[in-house]
Amino acid sequence: MKTISLEGEKRQAAGKKAAKLVRKENLVPCVMYGGAENVSFKVKYNDLLKIVFTNEFLKVNVNVDGKSADALVKDIDFHPVTDKILHVDFQELVPGKIVKTEIPVKLTGRAVGVATGGVLELNLRKLAVKATPEQLVEFIELDVTPLELGKSIKVKDLKTELTVLTPGGNPIARVIVPRAMRSAATKAAGEEEGEAEEAAE
């Protein structure tokens, strides 16, 4: 699992006024919880970009004044107009202690339904799971090769050692019948019905 290092400096003051002063320095106020104690710190704005704006599931090694700990990004506050990062919450990863998070789904293989004209659709890009830090993986792999036209693979069909919290009935991926194929099938059915009626007359 990919790990990115993040350097921070401990914040001495808390509250909205102190947070505003931090942002004026082009720094972002952060907090890390879940370990022995909560740690309030600040980091350079640009250092957060590669962590926040990514589709990858990352582990972050947070170093604050010489003390480091592995963590996950838990929550991000954005400015409602500019989308600028205002605050980030990190959850410290403690060995053996369960965390709840979302892990991306990675599709592999070529669905048989696609070969017959269907379109593969990914319905769930991430799955909610609970796991210990040792069990966390970069992505959950799903082989869609046996997926036929009009069929889906649901969460309950998934084979993984992780405890998945997403409801089992939700489809992860499916092969849909394109509109053009549906129209052609409807037209063909109508023509067959017309021919049958003519024959009966």
Image: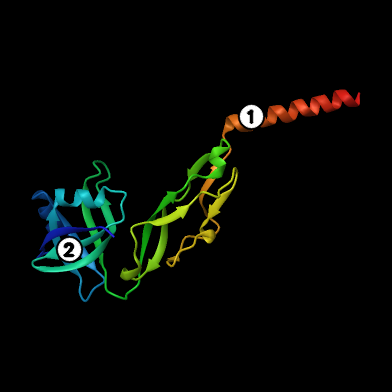
Q: Is residue 108 left or right of residue 32?
A: right
Which residue carries the number 1 mark?
A: 183
Disc number for residue 62? 2
Q: CA distance from mark 1 to mark 2?
A: 55 Å
**In the shown orientation, is residue 100 left or right of residue 63?**
right
Secondary structure at numbered mark 2: strand
How crowded is the residue under tag 1: few (<14 C-alpha within 10 Å), some, or many (20+)? few
x and y percentages locating residue 111 in the rendered image? 52, 45
Colouring: rainbow
Based on the displayed image, in which of its 4 quarters is residue 58 positioned?
bottom left
- Sequence-wise, which precedes: disc 1 or disc 2? 2
Q: Position of residue 102 (x, y in %)?
A: 37, 59
Is any part of residue 14 visible from this angle?
Answer: no
Q: Is residue 152 above or below residue 115?
A: below
Residue at screen point 55% across, 38% down: 115
Residue 148's spot in the image, x, y percent? 59, 46
**Is residue 45 left or right of 79 when viewed as pictured?**
left
Residue type indicated by callout 1: Ser
Of 109 and 136, nearer the camera is: 109
**Quarter of the figure with residue 187:** top right
Residue located 32% across and 76% down the image: 96
Helix or strand or loop: what does disc 1 sit on? helix
Q: Position of residue 121 (x, y in %)?
A: 49, 43
Q: Residue at x 26, y 71 (%)?
A: 34
Give the quadrant of the N terminus: bottom left
Count of residue discs: 2
Residue drawn at 14 percent across, 62 percent down: 41
